[in-house]
Image (tube, helix red, strand yellow):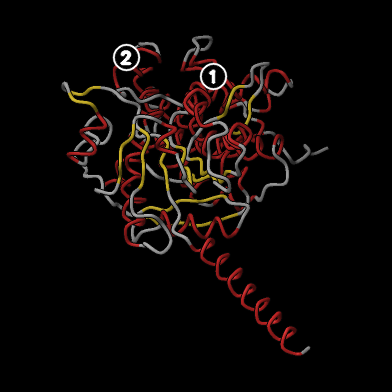
Amino acid sequence: MLAPKLGSSLIQHSFRRFSSSSKLNIKMAPKKVCIVGSGNWGSAIARLVGFNAERLPGRFEKNVSMWVFEEEVDGRKLTEIINTDHENVKYLPGRTLPKNIIAIPDIAEAAADADFLIFVLPHQFIKRACAPLIGKLKPGATGLSLVKGFAILPGGGIKLISDLISEEMGIPVSVLMGANLANEVADEKFCETTIGARDSEVGSDLKLLFQTENFRVTVVSDTQTVEICGALKNIVACAAGFCDGLKMGDNTKAATIRLGLKEMMKYGDTFYPGGNASTYFESCGVADLITTCYGGRNRRVSEAFVTRKKSIVDLETEMLNGQKLQGPETAAEVNYVLAAKGLEAEFPLFTAVHKICIGELQPEKLLDSLKNHPAHQCLIPPAA
């Protein structure tokens, strides 16, 4: 009777070894990456992701698919140009893309079998662009949002883009935000970024996928704060641009940035309680706020709004080569929520930016929102 028992034991032991080995192989299989979007920022990120996917063959598949909204440039399809000349001549001219970045015009084809989906397109287009992916993603896929802004709810109000993607796609979504002007990232100038990931294993994978010698990544679990920083800083950047257009000087601009940061933190405490205050001092917070208020397109267009006396819509068309401006729309989305809850007076800078953008307030009135800011209320009772 010993032989059958021994044979059974060996079979069970072998099965366990096979099962364990299979699970290990499945777990360690190289992961396929898809970039959903191919604008200025998407193309800059493709340089990093393509480089790391090729140099880490045990962790990621070499070829990275990139969904490209098809359009013609000088009589040629943009996907053809990217796949042949390895350059996004419309949105990131003069910088070479890795040869393992494969441009695909069909979003469902681009995302097929992807383990990681990197969403990097204007927040206004997320829902419409990603609709063809619903129900078609690989089981176990995870998302990463680089989208700065909020989603507008049909009945009014706003939602985090990561939550929108997660609910629509049925996948967990992490976020990446930081002081990352796209052209500087593409030129490999040193910078930092912040990844918000609740799953530490996912965070580790994403750090490997993005980090290079000149693009340093910090991973935190406070995903909501990371994301709201990426959206709200664009409102403050508009205020900084108005300051520049009005030639208010560096002291006033510094005050604008400081008060803007205070409103960002108050917004987070009010609508997304439980966040970590230290997250605002990562790259996604104060660093991104500073660089956007000095070098971003929201600042640049807002300055022109004052000096050229044209509408935001006209300036966006003239100055951004097809890119979208995030600040004014985010200001409108946030104002809807603040007004509905009677909180406009507690966020005077956010409120003023919105009203200036829609023509209800003259840019010169921005100064009133700074002078009379709640942060300047006297905290010491007057002497008897």
The tag earlier along the polypeptide, 2 or 1, is 2
Circles 2 and 1: CB atoms closer than 8 Å = no
The kind of residue tagged 2 is: Arg
Q: Is residue 319 above or below residue 179?
A: above
The N terminus lies in quadrant: bottom right
The C terminus lies in quadrant: top right
Q: Nearer the viewer, mark 2 or mark 1?
A: 1
Instruction: Please state which of residues 208 and 376 is positioned toward the viewer in this rendering.
Output: 208
CA separation in Å, label 2 and label 1: 19 Å
- Give x and y (percent) for residue 227: 56, 40
Label 2 neighbour load within 10 Å: few <14, some 14-19, many 20+: few
Helix, strand or loop for disc 2: helix
- Residue 283 — which label? none
Residue at x 32% of width, y 61% of height: 55
Q: Which residue is mark 1?
A: 354
Instruction: Please state which of residues 151 and 142 is positioned toward the viewer in this rendering.
Output: 142
18 displayed left or right of 325: right
Instruction: Please state which of residues 220 and 128 is positioned toward the viewer in this rendering.
Output: 128
- Give x and y (percent) for residue 165: 57, 34
Q: Which residue in the rendered view is the most extreme toward the bottom?
A: 2
The kind of residue tagged 1 is: His
Q: Which residue is mark 2?
A: 308
